Image (cartoon, rainbow, N blue to C red):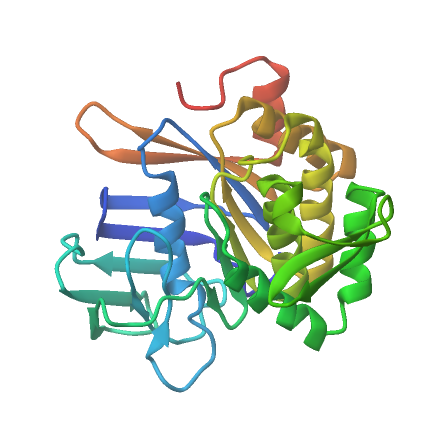
Amino acid sequence: MSEHFIKNIEIKNFKCFVDFKAEGFGRVNLIGGKNNVGKTAFMEAVFVISDAKEKKDKDILGTFMTIESFRGMSNNISGREIKAINNKYFNSKIRTTTFELKSTLKKDESLVNENVKLSFTNSNCNFIPSNMIGDDLIISIFDKIKKQRKREKLNKILNEFDKNILEFDIIENKPQVFLNSIEEFQDVIELGHGLKRYIAIISSILANKDGLIFLDELENGVHYTHLDKLWEIILTISKEQNVQVFATTHSKECIESYARVSKKLKDKEITFIKITKLQNDTIKAGVRDYDMLQYTIEDGHEVRGW
């Protein structure tokens, strides 16, 4: 497994997490559990430290959907255990956020306020939200695709998904696809939210070599019959691009598809993380590796957390 991948995390006083640990992450990690158990909050905590790379300044913006803004910190996180410690009253106008990289840094604090400009992207990281995806996010990712000369690769993947799609481009500041059936470009949104999410997911993995990608509620807008193809592309491209993926799901079909496709591809660098809230409100994570996930599915055990 790549040295830059996050393998363990410890979270204290962040949103619903008081004292939480999880370890043994793979290249691709799917997170399941009941509604409101903390799946998205878990990804947000990982995202906070996901841009902590080898940079000199320790003031990196890392912002995402459910909290207005965060200041991250910068250091080489290669393979080390990570602690993310956050003031849980983050809805106040001024929030003090503390991060610590165990055995590498003591402490670093920075004030965060709601005037910081929002962004869903860092240098080699994207957070794809569960709600409607804005054009700005698609455009920013596609700019990276063009700079890296990966447009042909993206178009090939989109054509494999839908033979009617021959090309993707940004025209008049709108994401559009060239359709074989009408021989002209059409606004992506006219073809449904699912296609827009699909383009955002695939583009972000292609554009962020050696990076990290966060996919909240992966199955949103994607018909269950397309899940195998989506997982095959995610697993294949993430391996080619050396990208670590964290995704959440509510769907049993999505989990079963994930297990089925990883088995087909013989890809063992995967995990399934089941997040559970105990009666005392303590949140625990059960991390299943490839072998344990396959056993769980094949033996007919419930995997969603309810």
Quadrant housing the C terminus: top left
Question: Residue 175, how many percent across, how many down?
Answer: 64, 59
Question: Residue 215, how many percent across, how many down?
Answer: 51, 47
Query: On the picture, is 53 further left or further right than 138?
Result: left
Q: Which residue is drawn at 59% across and 65% down?
A: 139
Is there any visible trace of residue 268 in the rendered image?
Answer: no
Question: Which quadrant would residue 286 be assigned to in this image?
Answer: top left
The residue furthest top is 300
The residue furthest bottom is 56
Query: On the picture, is 232 further left or further right than 80?
Result: right
**Front-most of 203 and 305?**
203
Q: Residue at x 65, y 50 (%)?
A: 188
Quadrant housing the N terminus: bottom right
Up-down: is 206 above or below 130? below
Is there any visible trace of residue 276 in the rendered image?
Answer: yes
Question: Residue 242, how many percent across, how many down?
Answer: 66, 61
Up-down: is 5 above or below 149? above
* Count of marks overlaid on the render: 0
Question: Residue 192, how many percent across, how many down?
Answer: 62, 40
Up-down: is 164 above or below 244? above
Query: On the picture, is 81 further left or further right than 225?
Result: left
**Front-most of 215 and 285?**
215
Q: Which residue is drawn at 70% across and 32% down?
A: 226
Q: Which residue is drawn at 36% across and 66% down?
A: 118
**Front-most of 220 and 259?**
220
Question: Which quadrant would residue 162 be assigned to in this image?
Answer: top right
